[in-house]
Amino acid sequence: MLDCTPKDITERKSGGIINPAKTCQPIGAMYAALGIHKCLPHSHGSQGCCSYHRMHLTRHFRDPVMASTSCFTEGSSVFGGGANLKASIQNVFHIYKPDVMAIHTTCLTETIGDDVSSIIKTAEVAEGKLVIHANTPSYVGSHITGFSNMTKAMVSYLAESTSPEKKEQANIIPGFVNPGDMREIKRLVESMGIEYIMFPDTSGVVDSPMTGEFEMYPEGGTTVEQLKDTGNSQITLALGRFASSDPADLLNKEYKVPVATLKTPIGIKATDALLMTLRNSFAREIPKEIEIERGQLVDIMTDTHFHFHGKTVAIFGDPDIVTGLTEFVLSLGMVPLHVLTGTPGGSSNSAAGSFEDDINSMLKGAGIEANVKSAGDLFTLHQWIKNQPVDLLIGNTYGKYIARAEDVPFMRVGFPILDRSVHSYLPIVGYHGAMRLIEMISNALLDRADRDAKDEDFELVM
Amino acid sequence: MAEDLAGSITERDDFIVTKGKNKKQLKCDTDSSAGCVSQRACVYCGARVVLNPITDAIHLVHGPIGCATYTWDIRGSLSSGAELYRNSFSTDLKEQDIIFGGAKKLAAAIDGLVNKYQAKLVFVYSTCIVGVIGDDLEAICNAASRRHNIEVIPVESSGFIGNKSAGYRAAGDALLRLIKPSAPAVIEKNNSINYLGDFNLAGEAWIIQNYLRQMGVELNVTFTGDSHYTALKSAPKAKLNIIQCAGSMIYLAGKMEELYQIPYIQISFLGIEDTATSLRNIAAALGEESMIVKAEELIAKETARVEDIIKGYRTKLEGKKAAIFVGGGFKAISLIKQFREIGIDVVMIGTQTGRKEEYEIMNELVDDGTVILDDANPAELEKFMMEKGANLLVGGVKERPLAYKLGIAFIDHNHDRKHPLSGFEGAINFAEEVYSTVCSPVWKSLNALGMKSGVANHG
């Protein structure tokens, strides 16, 4: 009954969206800012924006999400939001007492042309307190762009290089991933005995433990000291280029910190790449325990590969995550038929190439022809699936409409997940994350096989 | 920490009163202060939540993508027919549209969607940015309306022009436009009623519709839960409007009285007492003897059935304390009474958009010492819940994890409600939900480590 999508694919001239696979920049900026210790994200715009972003993040993480707003009124939009922002800065430090206030703009304040950096410069900010800002017009890019822009602002406002000698430490930009993923990446790096600064780091902020008390600023988050020190690091690992390469490039440009842009470490290949890069940069050995984990993963992959081989799959979500997932399912012998992100894909002319180029080259390597699209929507994905059905759909919660309409097994990965819990605590990155993904894929496919089996085909051992 | 935070907001003092302590009048219905962590939403949000339950309409959001994404199917309002409203449509404005205007894109989007879905009704919501770049929504909608010979209605809901209440009004205007008869012919009245301000969350409107049927009352159309184009068009024919969610519908009801001579009464189907009173009032307003008799029969039968069950919960809940923070004042008032039915006192009560009259009623209903506050921020909620020893918070999505972190039980009385909370059935569900959260064994895990918990010592 929920299925309103026609099968016939016709040209859509308006450029409008039906059932989005992305959202706007400010929420990404808000999420990134939560990854700074004792930081209050601030939304410079109407009240609704802030309210929506907090609601959406709260639903995904099931943790309190604190952020303030400039509370725009008709007057502020006519006369500019300078007065609102100055009052906000004063009120925020007076009332909520953060160490850092991280302002992001909205479509409204971008359009009326508030010059946020000038306003910050002329605002009274108490000694020892910091205000940073990122321009995050909602009409450009997506939430991933917003995450990248706020992370970049951490560099442009805070990073410094205090000596010509670089420290033996790595900057790690994890990208728009869950705190569970950030913890796993940190565990891998720590296991190699390498000093690092992860930023932003939302672990300990949006997965904070229950103590019986509400902490406006939980223990987690990258400290200002650490952010300052990023200019002294020996290398920056930008994990997932859509969310992470811009801030890494800025560190390189300003402070000559070399960049290694890697895929979000989803699956065996991307995790190998992360560890090899760390090994080569710091001349450290990969510890035995991690080698064992890898061996276990390969063992699991061989134990189960017959479940996956030739199974068709559709994947949608944020570009860095989708890229990692596509590479991983290919390594399992699965066949991605439809791969889509809502985020605009970067230009084909840029050195890094577009999302579509990345995916197509992976698929080509596997001899697969598929539908691949950036800046797409779930209406398009649904039409593709109607015309070419798949065995499995992987994506965020919004995929459930398609899964139901087409009766396809559905595996929830990405942002947002609004209808299941615990996902944000557990990784999909690293070897452990890959094991978890295999378990999820297996469960989805085999539960379906059990459900659909006739009595005579119903098997105990699979 | 809460003490610190909430204590220093002197600007907020006028928005908080303690019954019996302060003589002052609570300040409400004003803009929030810049830099606050407000729980409030915007004009677009208000308009969208009121109109979205109209099932067979295309709800097209004119703006950048965010506003459409965050409101995609969030209302939890159920449909017995069309499901078109559960899709998310946006013009997805880009930088060049901001510079050159979004009019062409909007017109093309309407054309594309109407051809695809064959809808008779399109709502076009304006967002913040449309208010600034100045697309002439009215003209674009009118032209599209003529092109397709259907209704294309602009909703003036630019986020910054006020708060959620202004959005209710924008939705009201859109609805008035929709129900306006095309010919100035005399409206043929029938004996039916319209039910305003029920969005059929978890199927609540269906419960009420069933009661009305049992009383022999003909329901014309519900605004807007499970409603559709044709049914809404017939709205002016009704003899009486009954309003559940006054915050969102009082404006529309007033206008319908003025334009179509439909009087309205406020009712509330939250709790046994208010449900019974409301059914009686509806019967009395319609004035038919048979309805009055049937209403009494229904009330007697249902009350007897429900009271026993509620009594069971009351013995387990007696003496617990509740805090309330909901959207509108009318709901808050009902909740005070409903809590009383299950033996719970309200120690803190607040709303996002309550009106002065509503706060006065709340003040009359609650006990001395109860804190009443408007447009609260999380720090204030924390401070007063802890101070007053609340065991339970009633709120919306953003308040849930706050309560849990404090070890306080929670029920959602907003979009995320899982069971219908209206009518006699709703009263049982409400008691059941309160019981299942307040008396959940999970709180014991917290206590086991010697941590504080708002619901410590429960039985």
Image (cartoon, coloured by chain):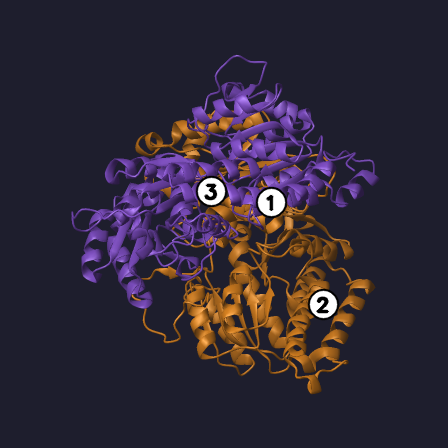
Q: Amino acid at mark 3?
A: Val
Q: Residues within 10 Å of mark 2 (few under 14, many from 20)?
A: many
Circle 1 Cα neighbour tier, 10 Å, few/some/many (<14 / 14–19 / ≥20): many
Q: Which mark is residue B293?
A: 3
Q: For the residue labelled by badge 3, is the local secondary structure a helix, a strand or a loop? A: helix
Pick the residue in front: B96 or B189: B189
In the picture as drawn, the residue positioned furthest to the left comes out as B184
| Cα distance between the residues tagged 3 and 1 | 81 Å
- Against B210, residue B45 (above or below) is above
Query: Which mark sits nearer the N-terminus, 2 or 1?
Result: 1
At numbered mark 2, what does the secondary structure look like: helix, strand or loop? helix
Chain of the residue that carries numbered disc 3 in the rendered image: B
Check the rendered structure and report the hue given to chain A. orange
Q: How far across and down, in percent of the image, does residue B92 sit?
A: 36, 55
Place of residue B212 in the rendered image (x, y in percent of width and height, measured from the top left) = 45, 48
Residue A435, numbered circle: 2
Q: Quadrant of the C terminus of chain A?
A: bottom right
Q: Which mark is residue A231?
A: 1
| Residue positioned most to the top | B23
Q: Colour of chain B?
A: purple
Q: Badge 1 sits on which subunit?
A: A
Q: Residues within 10 Å of mark 3 (few under 14, many from 20)?
A: some
User: A369 above or below B58?
Assistant: below
